[in-house]
Image (cartoon, grey):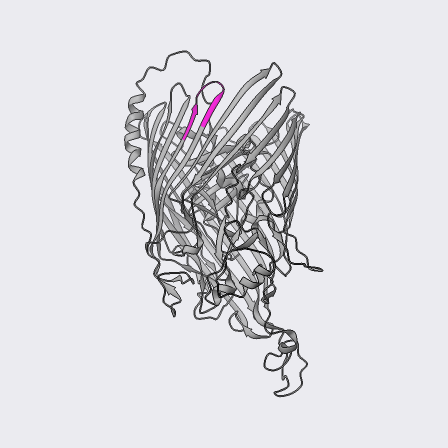
């Protein structure tokens, strides 16, 4: 039955706004001990602004917020940001929209920026959560000011800059135990930050990180002589140099990181197995019981993932005498990955080898001019250049009959050429498989600007636009080996290019009713570049090129500060329509995952953010998201074995009206922080967080990929001394609500029409108990 949701919650916004407007007249002159919240600064519009004056839906988290909840990975961020969800292969969705796509030839819909640089791929992030200044989750299209591909939203990470004239630093160590995993997994994280002056006008800041996390799942198959690295070991170093001399600022950054092991990205087990599958007996032989809490597999192949990332960037800022600031950021980043995944995650005679090597590098330059505020306007304008090259080598080998049979006719796998049948007139490399060598080159140019026009003391109009020219080309050499059954299309070389010009824009109004209450509304378009399918070229069932994706968003809201700045209450409502939405599905005819434009999608809802200083000791935070995201038109969604919309011979069905993946109706995070002085030299603290997410689906119209609502509870407590020593004990997901961050059909089983699903486990999926110790100096 199609799921078409009825959104009712957003009508509360206008009633709340009226109440807040009246509340401004209330007498707040009574003396109190506390002065209320400090100004919350954000970079949501590429300049430093007060959160309460920014007409954008944004959630900001400081480094201390991440430390309070022991958040160390991007994959854990969704526990604090209700609008953000994580899917398979570390993909993200905001407001129910994201590129749940395996291919490296398609850009994400949720962009990632670190220290002012937009990243073409999430793998470029390195070790992002070390020495954090702030993390901003910006909801809705953000590409106008942030560069590449943010049609659904943006995660903007800023690390701490060097501090002039100061020797300082911090070292920390964390130990955690995930006691409800079959491996009794443990983890250790060491972080170090050192800040030192170089001259009276410059300083150097160095970050180091080492992390070692045990596997969350247990592989019981004896893989002697085969590399099976299911844990995750990370190392990283980042150096930052800042020079400031009057109007001139030079900021240089360089980093190098390694990440070894499949970790949580490929921690997969069977959730359900079709009764007719041979997997039933194979799993039972190893005492593996598929189910929602199964964390054991018996994979008989190589499993590893080695990633190296790094880069360098330079930011030069100069303030002219007329108040105009010029900022130029040039950056180079790269990653190299070497992966082998035994994707059937069982001892079934199936996948033998599945290696993938990807070398990616990007160069970008952004020049911006920030104009000072006058009586009439303020704003910024700039130019942007981006170029990336990705070289991908992909291969899949699948076993057939036993070797003593496969060597003979008609299979002739690894055979000696011995003449016509019953001999072998040829020799195949593999029974079934595919291979491809792909080069993808992306070049993007853009000119952009956004200006605020002060129509009166209270009313401001905003207008902005971005002209983007994309030139994308791919060169694919595929099926160069010999197969008894080839599933990668015809042998050959396929070259294609796509040129596209887009104008994205934004118009908005902002009304400052008082110092404590602001209303805003806007309409604008976002853009995501075209891309390509990675293999199966020359197959009529698979489009080579995928068209660009365009989103149109209407957003309105208010931001308020009440009770002598002790209560911050913000609400936004939105409606976004996506045209040519890029979606991935499994094509039964081609026996492969393909990317296609899924016609239209609508995402609508509301976001609520509240901060309350209940007393001098107690602060409460609440973030909530109400969402309705569904396909308006998608008549080529792939049939799955459990789909009620498909007949026995159908490959596709009409998914119009179905929810998009990763779109929870309601998500909420409630936090409380209590601090109290224990002695003159020490204070204690307790942090607690309650996270709720309603039902969610990881597929389209597929009951087997749905996950029931979850509720998790985190708590930590500790002490901090005046000398900078902090000791914290913590428990995350204390009730051990086991939940995967992805559910998907096993490709091989899906090919055979069997409803067998795999689930992926992450660091938030199970209870974690631990202790962290840090020393600031």
Of 321 and 257, nearer the camera is: 257
Q: Residue furthest top?
A: 31
Tag count in the figure? 0
Estimate the x, y position of residue 79 in percent, counting from the top left.
49, 39
Residue extent of the magenta highlight: 610-620
In the rendered image, the vertical position of residue 713 relative to residue 542, given as above or below = above
Asked where in the image residue 463 lies, by quadrant, the reply is: top left
Estimate the x, y position of residue 663 in percent, counting from the top left.
40, 47
Quadrant housing the C terminus: top right
Residue 322 visible (yes or no): no
User: Residue at image x 56%, y 17%?
Assistant: 677
In the rendered image, the vertical position of residue 159 relative to residue 675, given as above or below = below
Of 459 and 373, nearer the camera is: 459
In the rendered image, the vertical position of residue 405 relative to residue 722, given as above or below = below
Residue 334 visible (yes or no): yes
* Residue 611 painted magenta: yes
- Magenta stretch, main secondary structure, is strand
Estimate the x, y position of residue 202 in percent, counting from the top left.
64, 29
> In the figure, is residue 692 to the left or right of 235?
left
Estimate the x, y position of residue 581 in percent, counting from the top left.
39, 54
User: Residue at image x 61%, y 14%?
Assistant: 680
* Residue 108 painted magenta: no
Quadrant housing the N terminus: bottom left
């Amino acid at each position: 039955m199609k799921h078409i949701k009825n959104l009712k919650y957003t009508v509360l916004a206008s009633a709340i706004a009226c109440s807040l407007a009246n509340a401004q007249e209330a007498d707040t002159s009574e003396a109190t001990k506390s002065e209320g919240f400090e100004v919350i600064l954000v970079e949501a519009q590429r300049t430093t602004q007060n959160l309460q004056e920014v007409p954008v839906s944004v959630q900001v988290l400081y480094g201390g917020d991440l430390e309070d909840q022991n958040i160390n990975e991007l994959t854990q961020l969704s526990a604090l940001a209700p609008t953000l969800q994580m899917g398979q292969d570390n993909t993200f969705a905001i407001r129910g929209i994201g590129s749940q796509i395996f291919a490296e030839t398609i850009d994400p819909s949720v962009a990632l920026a670190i220290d002012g640089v937009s990243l073409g791929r999430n793998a470029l992030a390195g070790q992002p959560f070390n020495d954090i200044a702030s993390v901003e989750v910006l909801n809705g299209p953000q590409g106008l000011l942030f560069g590449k591909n943010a049609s659904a939203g943006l995660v903007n990470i800023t690390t701490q800059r060097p501090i002039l004239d100061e020797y300082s630093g911090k070292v920390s160590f964390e130990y955690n135990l995930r006691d409800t995993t079959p491996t009794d997994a443990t983890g250790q994280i060491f972080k170090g930050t050192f800040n030192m002056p170089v001259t009276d006008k410059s300083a150097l800041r160095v970050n180091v990180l080492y992390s070692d996390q045990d596997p969350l799942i247990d592989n019981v198959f004896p893989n002697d002589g085969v590399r099976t690295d299911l844990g995750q070991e990370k190392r990283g170093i980042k150096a930052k140099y800042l020079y400031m001399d009057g109007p001139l600022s030079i900021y240089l950054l360089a980093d190098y990181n390694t990440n070894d092991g499949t970790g949580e990205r490929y921690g997969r087990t069977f959730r359900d197995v079709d009764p007719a599958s041979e997997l039933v007996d194979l799993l039972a032989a190893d005492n593996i019981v598929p189910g929602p809490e199964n964390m054991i597999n018996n994979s008989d192949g190589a499993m590893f993932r080695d990633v190296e990332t790094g880069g360098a960037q330079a930011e030069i800022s100069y303030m002219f005498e007329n108040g105009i600031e010029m900022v130029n950021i040039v950056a180079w980043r790269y990653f190299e990955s070497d992966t082998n995944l035994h994707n059937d995650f069982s001892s079934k005679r199936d996948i033998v080898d599945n290696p993938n090597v990807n070398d990616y590098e990007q160069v970008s330059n952004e020049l911006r001019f920030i104009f000072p505020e006058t009586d009439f306007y303020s704003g910024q304008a700039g130019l942007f250049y981006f170029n990336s090259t990705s070289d991908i080598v992909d291969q899949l080998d699948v076993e057939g009959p036993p070797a003593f049979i496969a060597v003979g006719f008609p299979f002739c796998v690894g055979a000696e050429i011995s003449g016509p049948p019953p001999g072998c007139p040829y020799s195949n490399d593999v029974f079934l498989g595919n291979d491809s060598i792909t080069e993808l080159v992306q070049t993007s140019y853009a000119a952009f600007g956004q200006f605020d026009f002060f129509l009166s003391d209270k009313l401001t109009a905003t207008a902005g636009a971005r002209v983007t020219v994309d030139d994308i080309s791919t060169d694919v050499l595929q099926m160069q080996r010999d197969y008894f059954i080839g599933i990668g299309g015809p042998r050959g070389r396929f070259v294609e290019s796509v040129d596209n010009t887009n104008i994205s824009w934004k118009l908005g109004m902002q009304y400052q009713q008082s110092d404590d209450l602001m209303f805003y509304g806007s309409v604008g378009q976002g853009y995501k570049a075209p891309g390509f399918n990675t293999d199966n070229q020359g197959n009529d069932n698979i489009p080579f090129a995928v068209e660009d994706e365009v989103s149109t968003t209407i957003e309105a809201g208010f931001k308020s500060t009440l009770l002598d700045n002790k209560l911050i209450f913000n609400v936004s409502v939105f409606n976004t329509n996506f045209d040519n939405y890029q979606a991935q599905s499994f094509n039964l005819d081609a026996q492969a995952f393909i990317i296609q434009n899924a016609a239209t999608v609508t995402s609508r809802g509301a976001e609520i953010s509240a901060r309350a200083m209940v007393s001098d000791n107690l602060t409460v935070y609440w973030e909530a998201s109400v969402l309705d995201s569904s396909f308006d038109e998608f008549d080529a969604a792939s049939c799955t074995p459990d789909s009620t919309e498909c007949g026995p011979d159908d490959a596709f069905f009409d998914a119009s009206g179905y929810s998009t993946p990763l779109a929870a109706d309601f998500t909420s995070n409630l936090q409380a922080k209590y601090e109290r002085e224990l002695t003159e030299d020490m204070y204690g603290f307790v942090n607690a967080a309650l996270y709720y997410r309603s039902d969610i689906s990881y597929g389209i119209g597929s009951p087997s990929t749905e996950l029931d609502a979850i509720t998790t509870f985190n708590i930590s407590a500790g002490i901090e001394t005046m000398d900078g020593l902090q000791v914290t004990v913590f428990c995350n997901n204390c009730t051990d609500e086991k939940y995967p961050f992805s559910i998907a059909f096993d490709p091989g089983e899906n090919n055979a029409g069997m409803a067998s699903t795999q689930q992926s486990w992450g660091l938030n999926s199970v209870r974690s108990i631990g202790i962290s110790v840090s020393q600031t100096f």
